[in-house]
Image: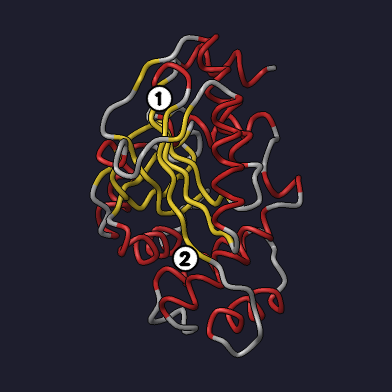
Amino acid sequence: MSGHSKWHSIRHKKGALDAKRGKLFTKLIKEITVAARLGGGDPESNPRLRTVIQKAKEANMPKDNIEKAIKKGTGELEGYNLEEVVYEGYGPSGVAIIIDAMTDNKNRTTAEIRSILSKNGGNLGENGCVSWIFENKGVITVSADKYDENTVMEVALDAGADDIKQEGDVWEIITEPENLNDVSESIKERGIEVQMADVMRIPKTTVKLDEKNAGKVLSLLEKLEDNDDVQKVAANFDIPDEVIEKIGQK
């Protein structure tokens, strides 16, 4: 499994989800506000907003919170000026890392990200230093235990997906970012439960890690994602399944 899938799988197994730490709503509100500011407050004509609203609903965010965040983005309510920032750098073993953040104080966030990286075996790089390693894709996951390959492949391809592959205990369905919502909804309409649907940075190449270095990289990623301004973290690592099991049990 590649880095993006490994990381989400491990966080799930360890129970280290943002929702349990009170951070998920804060991150989602920021994302909704920016999406509405950039593309308007109508989710039907704003795919990015539609995606994050669905994420918010799945996280059981109250409807009022969603509506207020949209109105802050469109200027109907007074809000704070959020800026999207992308950081690029390296972690232990030369793993490439891209950090998507939203902040009202870029200087503060930059200093915090640089500090987290430097204290955990990494370093902040120049813009463009690792972005070429990744490509944006829509990623939908469904349980590999509940659904067989033929069923998922038929439904996914009929829905307009580009590819499907098994990543551990899930089927990973790949789409173009702009098709994510339509494909996800089509899959649900066919009776298949979607675990996750999101736009992610997928690495084209990966660095294989042993248990020692895997622990270092995962610790760094967890600290980055715990930062309130960080929305997403992508890294180009690969960890053998037996190492994943050991880490997940700790």
Q: What residue type is labelled 1?
A: Val
Few, some or many residues within 10 Å of mark 1 (<14, 14–19, 20+): many
Question: Compared with residue 27, is residue 147 higher up or lower down, i.e. above or below?
Answer: above
The N terminus - image quarter? top left
Q: What residue appears at the point 47 percent right and 25 percent down from the top-left corner?
A: 91
Q: Which is nearer the eye, 95 or 82?
A: 82
Where is mark 2, residue-wise?
Answer: 51
Q: Which of marks 1 and 2 is in front?
A: 1
Q: What residue appears at the point 65 percent right and 87 percent down from the top-left corner?
A: 77
Q: What residue appears at the point 30 percent right and 37 percent down from the top-left corner?
A: 129
Q: Where is residue 188 in the image (x, y as percent from the top left)?
A: 45, 60
Q: How far apart are marks 1 and 2 (CA)?
A: 29 Å
Image quarter of residue 160: bottom left
Q: What residue type is labelled 2?
A: Thr
Q: Earlier in the sequence, mark 1 or mark 2?
A: 2
Q: Which is nearer the eye, 167 or 227?
A: 227
Q: Position of residue 192 (x, y in %)?
A: 46, 53
Where is mark 1, residue-wise?
Answer: 95
Question: Compared with residue 236, is residue 111 higher up or lower down, i.e. above or below?
Answer: below
Q: What residue appears at the point 71 percent right and 49 percent down from the top-left corner?
A: 19
Question: Compared with residue 179, is residue 81 higher up or lower down, i.e. above or below?
Answer: below
